[in-house]
């Protein structure tokens, strides 16, 4: 073990502290020997627990600094790549886009660049290819151009209210056509005339309804015999009075003789003979009826016409016999006619056969 100087200077490797490598300290110790005090070398061991924790922390700090430097370098490279990205209006970019585009589609260039790679403290520093692979991107060297991903985007289509028609890639897309509804402005005079005509039609309909209502009720509700259907009050005047003015009440089924009928605004009133007074026959608004006119008595039915004399059984039997005799005579006549026709046919055939035979005989005689 080489001796160390009494001043306590370190002979450790550069970059390493005294606590990491250990040191030798010289202390003057006197044991009563001749020649003065002697130097005793003591060695401090770095294997204690606090010193080990400090060393680990220092190593971690060094790694974090290295990772930060690597991260800054990657960010600088990414910024350089972004600055070198070609503009969309450049000739080279247009040429490449024209080569990759297909007929019927419009190609748009989208540049995908690598995001910032954040290195977690305590991890190993990654090289640019490994960092790009960890981020899910393809690494490109700094001099090379960034990777360009081309996505085919369909062209915009013209819009119409009825149908959607595709636009040719050569033609520019047409702007959407706005359909403006045509609104006709009605003059004030025409509107007033329409309103007046509608009111007149409504008035004429109401008048016709009331006229028909009156005709129906005048025809139905007239003087005559009435039967009370709902309990009704007999009052001394045609107009509706108070409860104190009621003469009497007529129950359901009462028969009264109405001598006159009067039409008021809401009801049809009738003046009865007994008890003398006025009763309500029907309500004009809802058609509620208190008394109904009794149907006139039916006329006496005319006596039924005299029944036709039915033939006696004997007459029926004679009639049947007569019909049977006629049928037998008719059948006999048909049979005789058929027989006569057959006889005539037979006789005609026999005569023809005899004539033919006679002709043959004459020919034979002539040949002889």
Image (tube, rainbow, N blue to C red):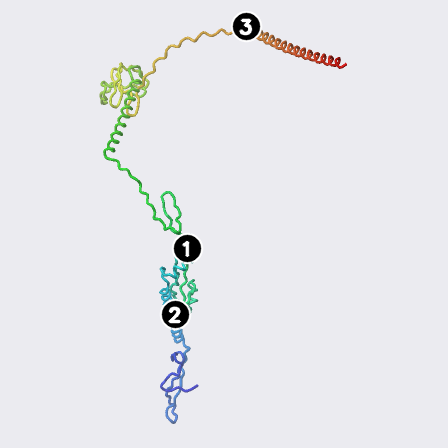
Pair 1/3: label in front? 1
Callout 3 secondary element: helix
Residue drawn at x 36%, y 12% as measured from the top left: 298
Q: Is residue 243 left or right of residue 17?
A: left
Q: Residue 155 location, x and y as percent?
A: 39, 51
Residue holding disc 2: 70
Residue drawn at x 40%, y 49% as measured from the top left: 168
Q: Residue 329 location, x and y as percent?
A: 60, 7
- 37 shown above or below 317: below
Question: Can you say which quadrant of the picture contains the C terminus?
Answer: top right
Q: Nearer the viewer, residue 14 or 69?
A: 69
- 47 shown above or below 189: below
Q: Nearer the viewer, residue 290 or 14?
A: 14
User: How many angstroms separate mark 1 from mark 2 (CA)?
Assistant: 37 Å
Q: Nearer the viewer, residue 6 or 353?
A: 353
Callout 1 secondary element: strand
Residue holding disc 1: 152
Label 1–label 3 contact, CB within 8 A:
no
Pair 1/2: label in front? 1
Among the two numbered marks 1 and 3 on one chain, the one whose residue lies closer to the N terminus: 1
Among the two numbered marks 2 and 3 on one chain, the one whose residue lies closer to the N terminus: 2
Give residue 315's mark: 3
Q: How many marks?
A: 3
């Amino acid at each position: 073990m080489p001796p160390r100087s009494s001043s306590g200077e370190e002979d450790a490797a550069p970059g390493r502290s005294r606590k990491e490598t250990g040191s030798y300290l010289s202390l003057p110790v006197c044991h009563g020997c001749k020649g003065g005090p002697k130097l005793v070398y003591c060695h401090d061991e770095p294997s204690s627990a606090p010193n080990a924790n400090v060393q680990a922390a220092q190593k971690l700090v060094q790694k974090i600094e290295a990772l930060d430097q690597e991260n800054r370098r990657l960010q600088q490279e990414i910024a350089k790549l972004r600055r070198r990205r070609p503009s969309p209006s450049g000739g080279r970019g247009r040429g490449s886009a024209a080569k990759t585009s297909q007929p019927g589609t419009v190609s748009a260039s989208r540049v995908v660049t690598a995001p910032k790679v954040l290195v977690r403290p305590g991890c190993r520093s990654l090289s640019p290819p490994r960092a790009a692979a960890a981020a899910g991107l393809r690494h490109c060297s700094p001099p090379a151009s960034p990777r360009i991903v081309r996505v085919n985007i369909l062209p915009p289509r013209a819009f119409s209210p009825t149908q959607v028609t595709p636009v040719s890639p050569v033609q520019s897309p047409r702007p959407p056509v706005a359909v403006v509804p045509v609104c006709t402005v009605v003059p004030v005079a025409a509107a007033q005339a329409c309103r007046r005509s509608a009111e007149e039609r409504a008035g004429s309909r109401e008048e016709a309804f009331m006229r028909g209502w009156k005709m129906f009720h005048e025809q139905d509700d007239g003087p005559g015999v009435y039967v009370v259907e709902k309990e009704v009050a007999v009052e001394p005047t045609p107009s509706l009075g108070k409860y104190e003015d009621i003469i009497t009440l007529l129950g359901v089924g009462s028969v009264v003789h109405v001598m006159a009928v009067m039409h008021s605004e809401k009801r049809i009133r009738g003046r009865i003979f007994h008890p003398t007074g006025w009763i309500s026959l029907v309500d004009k608004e809802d058609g509620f009826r208190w008394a109904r006119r009794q149907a006139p008595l039916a006329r006496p039915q005319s006596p039924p016409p005299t029944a036709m004399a039915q033939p006696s059984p004997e007459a029926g039997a004679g009639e049947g016999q007569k019909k049977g005799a006629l049928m037998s005579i008719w059948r006999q006549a048909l049979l005789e006619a058929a027989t006569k026709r057959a006889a005539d046919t037979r006789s005609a055939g026999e005569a023809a056969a005899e004539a033919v035979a006679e002709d043959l005989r004459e020919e034979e005689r002539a040949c002889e």
